[in-house]
Image (tube, rainbow, N blue to C red):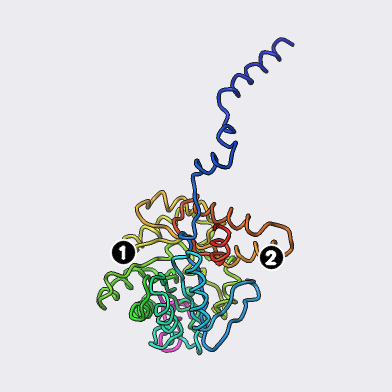
Amino acid sequence: MISVLNAERQTTQYRAVRRPRRLRQTAALRGMLRETELNAGDLIYPLFVRHGRGRTEIRSMPGVYQLSVDEAVREAESAAALGIPALILFGIPLEKDPVGLENFAEYGIIQQAIRAIKRRIPEMVLITDVCLCEYTDHGHCGILNAGEHYHAHLPEGYVLNDETLEVLAKVAVSHAESGADIVAPSGMMDGMVAAIRGALDESGFEHLPILSYAVKYASSFYGPFREAAEGAPKFGDRKSHQMDPANGREALREAALDVEQGADILMVKPALAYLDVIHTVKQAFPELPLAAYNVSGEYAMIKAAAMNGWIDEAKVTLETLTAIKRAGADVILTYHAKDAAGWLK
Ligand SMILES: [Zn+2]
């Protein structure tokens, strides 16, 4: 009986000294001591732009639309009014072909959208996605080993790395010429940052930053995006270039290569199932800004649960975005950007 009392007293004494709850008592105290602050200024809003007129809602992403150029300008204006500093643009071309010619055409959909948004909101930071998958008829991120590009020593249908780099360089220069502020190669081709850096510099765009999708996983969380951007591969998958979701250490190798090649901002994609990777990359490269892509599947899961009344959309979204920032992201690409900016007001 005596020993139990002693044990109790010791525990009581210990608790009396260290009480983290002291700092959680009021909203003012919690606010003052909060470690991670999420702001509208941290958010990058993705837009899908297509030819024609009007807007079409994406079935698996309620509240997200394919937008005509004039609708994209309207959407950009409402994002700017909410304090969102940047957009990332994805294009849906009129026609697709094996190389994706519209990707670097002067009157391509992205080129038109950049000019139109810049005319109306010159201060909006315009980031462009640089890849082939939305533009190719086969839906792959590069030129395939087939037809006139066939090499007998490589498997049929293999994504040809270095031939693809030439196209990516053309696309980046075309976006720069149209007025893009940052180009963002997303295809996970080896050497893509160096190829784009070289082409931009040769064309007089040595001042244009590159945001590299340095650490992009072959994730199943991209499902709804493929409907949005109409860029699903017609056969096969992207496992020969995107990373294996089981690999964390390899992220450091991918990030280091892109830093060496001159990447100005790194990205980890997806975000929520990869918070450890975001943390690791930030620890390894604290001197570079880090972006994280809160992808379509992450958005769709929250939306679906909220529409069923199972979760509070605003609270869960803000908690998710705060967690991504806490893990180490400086900026977050998210379809919830406008909603979040509104909730943060
Ligand atoms: Zn791609």
- The magenta region covers 142-161
Residue 261 is left or right of residue 266, and the answer is left
Whether 41 is drawn above or below 32: the answer is below
User: Magenta span has 117?
Assistant: no
Q: Give the foreground label among 1 and 2.
A: 2
Q: Quadrant of the N terminus?
A: top right
Image quarter for residue 120? Answer: bottom left
Q: Residue at x 60, y 36 (%)?
A: 25
Q: Residue at x 50, y 54 (%)?
A: 38
Front one among 165 and 340: 340
Q: Residue at x 60, y 58 (%)?
A: 317
Horizontal and vertical percent for residue 150?
42, 84
First reached walking from the N terminus: tag 1 or tag 2: 1
Horizontal and vertical percent for residue 131?
44, 76
Q: Main secondary structure of the magenta part?
A: loop
- Report, in whole angstroms, how far the alpha carbon at label 1 lies from the one at label 2: 40 Å
Q: Quadrant of the C terminus?
A: bottom right
Label 1 is placed on what type of residue? Answer: Gly
Whether residue 143 is visible, yes or no, is no
Q: Secondary structure at mark 1?
A: loop
Which residue is farthest top? Answer: 2
User: Magenta span has 158?
Assistant: yes
- The 10 Å Cα crowd at callout 1, few under 14, some 14 to 19, many 20 or more, is some
Label 2 is placed on what type of residue? Answer: Ala
Whether 145 is drawn above or below 14: the answer is below
- The 10 Å Cα crowd at callout 2, few under 14, some 14 to 19, many 20 or more, is some
Q: Secondary structure at mark 2?
A: helix
**Label of residue 304 in the image:** 2
From the Cβ of disc 1, is ligand 1 less than 8 Å away?
A: no
Horizontal and vertical percent for residue 30?
55, 41
Q: Badge 1 is on which residue? A: 262
From the Cβ of disc 2, is ligand 1 less than 8 Å away?
A: no
